[in-house]
Amino acid sequence: MTLQDLKFGIYEKALPEMASWPEKLDLAKRLNFSFVEMSIDESERRLARLEWARDERKAFINCVFDSGISVPSICLSGHRRFPLGSHNPDIRARARKILHDAINFSAEVGIRTIQLAGYDVYYETGDNDTWQWFLDGLNEGVQKAAKEHVMLSMEIMDTHRISSIVRFMNLKRMIMNPWFTVYPDLGNLTAWGNDVVQELELGKDLITAIHLKDTLAVTKTFPGQFRDVSFGDGCVDFVAAFRALKRLHFTGPFLMEMWSGKGKNPVKEIEEAREWIITRMKEGGYINE
């Protein structure tokens, strides 16, 4: 694969926070990315996107079309605040509405993949009930997504419940639907001490896309660090991962996950990170010179 063939995207939160969508897409294009992954996080400002009126949705579609840069996926982290497994029935109802609204929104504006957070709860203590409520809400969402031709893809998380592709596969056995897949994060996989190459081999037929970020490993005395670790300062063996993905003939998209949007010089941070990742891809033989 050549660099020109690579589907390499950037997370919306890496881009300047207050930039408009035309500005974000223009910057992503100038930085040589092929797509942007939208964030629908816990904030009311981003959750409100799911309520955009028809004219707002049309304006977004036109903006994407005119830019030449796609927005094919959503990172739906809003379920941290409103989890599908909450003990509070009102929060569970809001969580299901968020998921269903996200599916409808995606179907209408052309987004193909919704990355889900593998949390039954996040700010509460989980138990058997929270897990069952999570499964019920997820199964309902997958059935709706299938009808709308929208993929729901579970991220390998920064919490133990879905901390590996092995654990995802156990979940997949409960929700046997082709519109439910896995979205591995190399940083999260590594931080939990998984054999990343074996994990990728296990999930190779179900991987929708891959998040790229560095992390610090979980130990008996350290909870790990799952974000804001500069590439090269963490524990991820990117070269070995890219070598394995080459052998597995993985041709799906990669998403560089960063949170530099609030920084003083996000463009420089993104440029340096992109160059670092491309170098590791070349060292692993995933792309040609």
Image (cartoon, rainbow, N blue to C red):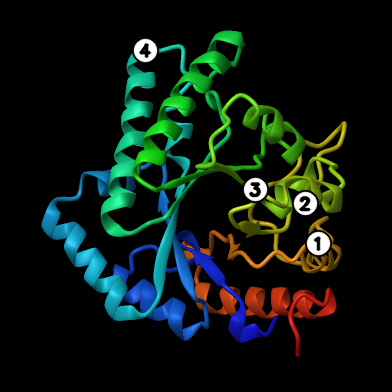
Which sits in the foreground, 24 or 18?
24
Q: For the residues marked 2 and 1, what is the alpha-carbon distance in whole angstroms?
A: 8 Å
Q: Are marks 2 and 1 in contact (CB under 8 Å)?
A: yes
Labels 4, 1: front one? 1
- Residue shown at the point (71%, 73%) measured from the top left: 277
Amino acid of disc 4: Pro
Which sits earlier in the primary sequence, circle 4 or circle 1? 4
Q: Secondary structure at mark 4?
A: helix
Q: Earlier in the sequence, mark 1 or mark 3?
A: 3
Residue 155 in the image: x percent, y percent? 60, 43
Residue at mark 2 to residue at mark 4: CA–CA distance? 36 Å
Q: Quadrant of residue 280?
A: bottom right
Residue labelled with disc 2: 200
The image shows residue 177, relative to residue 37, as above or below, that is above
The amino acid pointed to by label 2 is Leu
Q: Is mark 4 in CB contact (under 8 Å) with mark 1?
A: no
Residue 271 position in % (x across, y down): 59, 80
Q: Is residue 3 visible to us here?
A: yes
Picture quarter containing residue 16? bottom left
In-front residue for pair 170/187: 170
Residue 265 visible somewhere in the drawing = no
Q: Is residue 88 above or below residue 134?
A: above
Mark 2 vs mark 1: in front: 2
Amino acid carrying label 3: it is: Leu
Q: Earlier in the sequence, mark 2 or mark 4?
A: 4
> Label 4 neighbourhood size at 10 Å, few (<14), some (14-19), many (20+)?
few
* Distance in Å between CA atoms under marks 4 and 3: 32 Å
Q: Secondary structure at mark 1?
A: helix
